[in-house]
């Protein structure tokens, strides 16, 4: 589940009913992206459904409760680990704030796993911190979400596929006549076009295995 999808779930639990347009405006993505998010939530067994016509919109079953049973102990362990990994290479640290929210769901398990990670695990993955919230990354994120081609440093028609984290920094895995891997910190300008593409490209893992 993406963090935005979790935020959509929390929003629906609070408001019970909304529309694709309202969610798109709130989360600053297209209605197409929101539709995919709702489909993803539904596929996980969360009772989110849509209705058409007057009074229609996106609904969640009023009896559904977001409780500690939503996450297994293994889920919480992996979430805490992922947050620690993210903080280890990111310039902007959000682990503590997110851990506090997670503690509202499962305080004992979260505190225990956080203690273990803090005391028994050190992470040294990258040479220097990565800024994942600068304007370049925000544009890349939008292109990834909306599956839109980008213009990168004057090169048109670049399909952004995914990020790749390496020891020397964050890279963008993309396609333009062939697969390319470019350091994000070296991108000077990126603009999202209005041309969409079908996600038919190899993943980075598939690309590596095919070489």
Image (tube, rainbow, N blue to C red):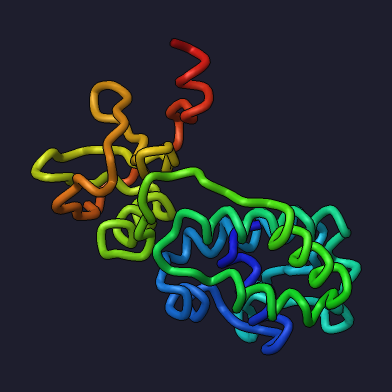
Residue 29: which quarter of the image? Answer: bottom left
Q: Residue at x 22, y 52 (%)?
A: 193
Left or right for 16, reference 127: right
Q: Can the viewer see residue 93? A: yes
Q: In the rendered image, which quarter contains the N terminus?
A: bottom right
Q: Residue at x 15, y 53 (%)?
A: 189
Q: Can the viewer see residue 52? A: no
Residue 178: which quarter of the image? Answer: top left
Q: Residue 103, percent across and down?
A: 77, 78
Left or right for 207, reference 77: left
Q: Residue furthest left?
A: 154
The front one of 95 and 25 is 95
Q: Residue furthest front?
A: 119
The front one of 187 and 16 is 187
The front one of 133 and 123 is 123
Q: Residue 3, percent across and down?
A: 59, 65
Q: In the rendered image, which quarter contains the C terminus?
A: top left
Q: Residue 181, percent across and down?
A: 31, 31
């Amino acid at each position: 589940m993406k963090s935005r999808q979790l935020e959509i779930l929390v929003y629906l639990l609070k408001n019970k009913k909304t529309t694709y347009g309202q969610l798109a405006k709130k989360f600053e993505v297209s209605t197409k992206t929101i539709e995919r998010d709702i489909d993803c939530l539904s596929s996980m067994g969360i009772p989110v459904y849509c209705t058409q016509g007057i009074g229609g919109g996106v609904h969640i079953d009023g009896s559904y409760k977001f409780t500690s049973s939503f996450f297994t102990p293994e889920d919480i362990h992996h979430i805490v680990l992922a947050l620690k990994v993210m903080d280890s290479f990111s310039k902007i640290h959000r682990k503590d704030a997110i851990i506090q929210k997670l503690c509202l769901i499962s305080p004992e398990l979260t505190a225990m796993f956080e203690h273990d990670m803090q005391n028994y695990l050190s992470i040294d993955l990258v040479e220097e911190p990565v800024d994942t919230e600068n304007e370049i990354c925000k544009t890349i994120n939008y292109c990834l979400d909306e599956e839109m081609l980008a213009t990168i440093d004057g090169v048109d028609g670049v399909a952004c596929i995914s990020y790749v984290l390496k020891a020397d920094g964050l890279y963008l895995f993309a396609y333009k006549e062939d697969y390319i891997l470019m350091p994000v910190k070296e991108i000077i300008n990126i603009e999202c076009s209005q041309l969409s593409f079908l996600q038919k490209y190899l993943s980075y893992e598939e690309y590596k295995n095919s070489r």
